Image (tube, grey):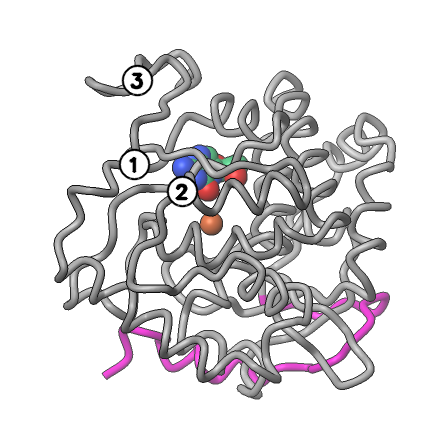
Amino acid sequence: MATDLPPPPGARPDWTIDQGWATYTQAEHDVWITLYERQRDLLPGRACDPFLKGLDALDLHRTGIPEFGRINEELERLTGWTVVAVPGLVPDAVFFDHLANRRFPAGNFIRKPEQLDYLQEPDVFHDVFGHVPMLTDPTFADYMQAYGQGGLRALNLGRLHNLARLYWYTVEFGLLETAAGLRIYGAGIVSSHAESIFALDDPSPNRLGFDLARTMRTPYRIDDFQQVYFVIPSLQALLDATLADFGALYAALAGQTDIPIEAVLPDDKVFTRGTQAYARRGGRTAA
Ligand code: HBI
Ligand code: FE
């Protein structure tokens, strides 16, 4: 299993490394500032209040890529979480162990100027701008730790792919229902200029009420905007979902097929019945 991969040279056994903040070039800081300022202008009215509050509490933008030690002084005081630097994706078991101990592994590298709009591997902007502000919210902070604890169990039960879908449709691409309308809390959306618009405004994707088993049965896209977004009524509801008996849930899932990614089921709470026009046009790669 990939869990016993040795850490890369220079990394500690838990795959953490020093952030190397002093080695960032001004060009790298400039990429952060460009991305930060673009999102800061776009997100009010789109990102949920806990995200915007966290962004201000951690004062992330300053003059470029933030120094994790400085973030951690405030973050640890707020919810006990800290950001730890890693060279990139780490094995699942390592990832879950960090989350279970309130450590968020963040890539220390930043994308190139020509990758401004899209990259596959999570860089420091996706991880720190996208994920860390929500960790200042006590309820979401508890959810992320519960997810880490659940991940270690799922790994041992061979149910990682179901739990990865839960992560994808909540932590990465989740939407929150508010009195003012749908708002973004997912890091994959909030760190992407184009998807911060698409996820809320475009008629193409489905927007459906969150349900634990429903998300675990639904495949997701790793290469393009999502074809479905799941909407939670509150962060508390998301945390409460982790109190379910996952053993019974996994047993039920074993006898069920995946749900086609574009499907809307009779039991779904439908916020948007999407046209799927974007996906049918071929998405990002369409001419
Ligand atoms: N490693 N650094 C890093 N960041 C992630 O988001 C991450 C990871 N390893 C595994 C992983 N995510 C997913 O496979 C789990 O969420 C299932
Ligand atoms: Fe992420």
Question: What kind of element bears circle 1?
Answer: loop
Q: Position of residue 243 (x, y in %)?
A: 86, 37
Whether label 2 lies within 8 Å of ligand 1 gets the answer: no
Q: 109 or 54: nearer the eye?
A: 54
Residue drawn at point x = 40 percent, y = 42 percent:
68
Residue drawn at point x = 47 percent, y = 38 percent:
83
Q: Earlier in the sequence, mark 1 or mark 3?
A: 3
Disc number at residue 182?
A: none
- Circle 3 or circle 2, nearest the eye: 2
Q: Position of residue 198 (x, y in %)?
A: 49, 80
**Is the Cβ of the residue at disc 2 closer than 8 Å to that at disc 1?**
yes
Q: Earlier in the sequence, mark 2 or mark 1?
A: 1
Using the numbered discs, state the Cα–Cα distance from disc 2 to disc 1 in whole angstroms: 7 Å
Using the numbered discs, state the Cα–Cα distance from disc 1 to disc 3 in whole angstroms: 16 Å
283 displayed left or right of 176: left
260 displayed left or right of 146: left
Would you say residue 74 sits in the magenta stretch? no
The magenta span reads 262-287
**Is the Cβ of the residue at disc 3 closer than 8 Å to that at disc 2?**
no
Whether label 3 lies within 8 Å of ligand 1 gets the answer: no
165 displayed left or right of 122: right
Q: Main secondary structure of the magenta part?
A: loop
Q: Which residue is mark 1?
A: 19
- Circle 1 or circle 3, nearest the eye: 1
Question: What kind of element bears circle 3?
Answer: loop
Disc number at residue 68?
A: 2
Query: Residue type at mark 3?
Result: Pro
Using the numbered discs, state the Cα–Cα distance from disc 3 to disc 2 in whole angstroms: 21 Å
Q: Residues within 10 Å of mark 2 (few under 14, many from 20)?
A: many
Q: Which residue is mark 3?
A: 7
Quarter of the image containing the C terminus? bottom left
Query: Residue type at mark 1?
Result: Gln
